[in-house]
Image: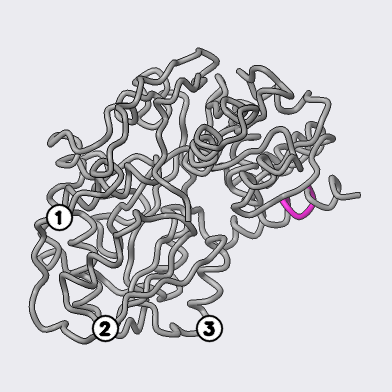
Amino acid sequence: MLRKVLLGLGLSLLVLGIPVLAQDAPAETPEATQPAMTTWTCPTGFEGKSFTWFNWATYEADTTRSDFGTLCGLSNVGESIFGSNEELIAKLGQGNPGYDVVTPTGSNVPQMIREGLLEKLDLSKIPNFANVSKDLQNPVYDPNNEYTIPYQWGTTGVGYNTQAIPEITSWDDVWNYNGNVDWIDDPRVMLGIALHNLGLDPNSTNKDEIEQAATYLIDHGKNVVAFPADTGQEDLVNGVADIVIEYSGDIFQKMDECATTPDENCDGKFNYVIPKEGSVRCVDNLAIPKDAPNPDLSMAFLDYILDPQVAANISNYTAYATPDQKAIDDKLIDDSYLSNPIIYPTADVEKTLFSISDQGDEVAVLYNNAWTEVKTALSN
């Protein structure tokens, strides 16, 4: 699928409206293109078993699953893909068809816990949990990490075609653009951005405030042409939209593809920005779904993922930030990523970011209804 993302290819990134030139990447060698092998040791007793990961697309390194299969002597290590947390929850709500591990976003974890869709973890079987950065342990959506471990984290911001619009610094640049724009099909993210821009709590439970946010989006969405769930980057590259609201890593991956394409007109064509007003920080997690075929094998996989080299290989591929502090401390993360304030935000940028938290099923209905109102109004 997508190759390793090299942000240090002379691409100028924008964060809070300030240009940040990425560091030059070292010249690639055949060895450099291959992820380094981990020294992690698999517990015994899993030989011949199979394993399936229900995951987002392009969200692991080239050898993440195959190395795990080799180390544990598995007969098969497969993957199924979902496109949204709603799809993940709906699938598991029908009964686990055989998934060993799933990758939910933090804001959706409380709902999955309430609905009994996740198994509790035994952290004694995940010793590499000690490698997780302290600020990503014990999250509000899963106190004491009873059900999840952090996998990757990033932001939702703005990807854009620099040939159509040379610079974006503000959300107003997105709302006022005279051209095609995609909004990600995520009610909590989009309404959270609106609430934040209105000076309100992005996790408001107030019906009137949520309706106010819906009105704000309707008033600022006359240029919206589509609401992709997690493929806005494809619309950007294909020219369907000049601006997309998308996950940071998805845009970075397309920036790299463009930088390495034979088409000289493509290099430098796309960019990503966290608008100066701020945006959403999200954490994706690994969890064991209810009725997983082999929970001990699932926990071995979680421990494997938190091995510093494995974690580094993944983040060096996806261009999302790793929660594995040891991978950072051991200097296993590419310097061009670690020094990039969009991937690993500075303190000033962190102040503008906010997280989406679960507010219960009744409030979720308010957000979903408001989002339906927005999409209906902007689709007419």
Task: Give the residue type at disc 2.
Answer: Ser
Label 2 and label 3: CA atoms lie apart by 27 Å
Task: State the residue at coordinates (20%, 46%).
Answer: 132
> In this picture, is 323 found above or below 305?
above
Find out whether residue 329 is within the magenta segment: no
Disc 3 packing (10 Å; few <14; some 14–19; many ≥20): few
Quadrant in which residue 68 is drawn? bottom left
Res. 312 mark: none
| Residue 365 percent location from the top left of the image | 65, 60
Identify whether 314 is placed above or below 361: above
Marks 3 and 1, the one that precedes in the sequence: 1
- Residue that carries the numbered disc 3 in the rendered image: 94
Q: Is residue 198 above or below residue 54?
A: above
Give the amino acid at mark 3: Gln
Q: Nearer the viewer, residue 210 or 376?
A: 376
Looking at the image, which is closer to me, 43 or 375? 43
Residue at the far top in the pictured view:
18
How far separated are the C-alphas under marks 1 and 2? 20 Å
Q: Which residue is mark 2?
A: 75
Asked if 184 appears above or below 100 in the picture, the reply is above
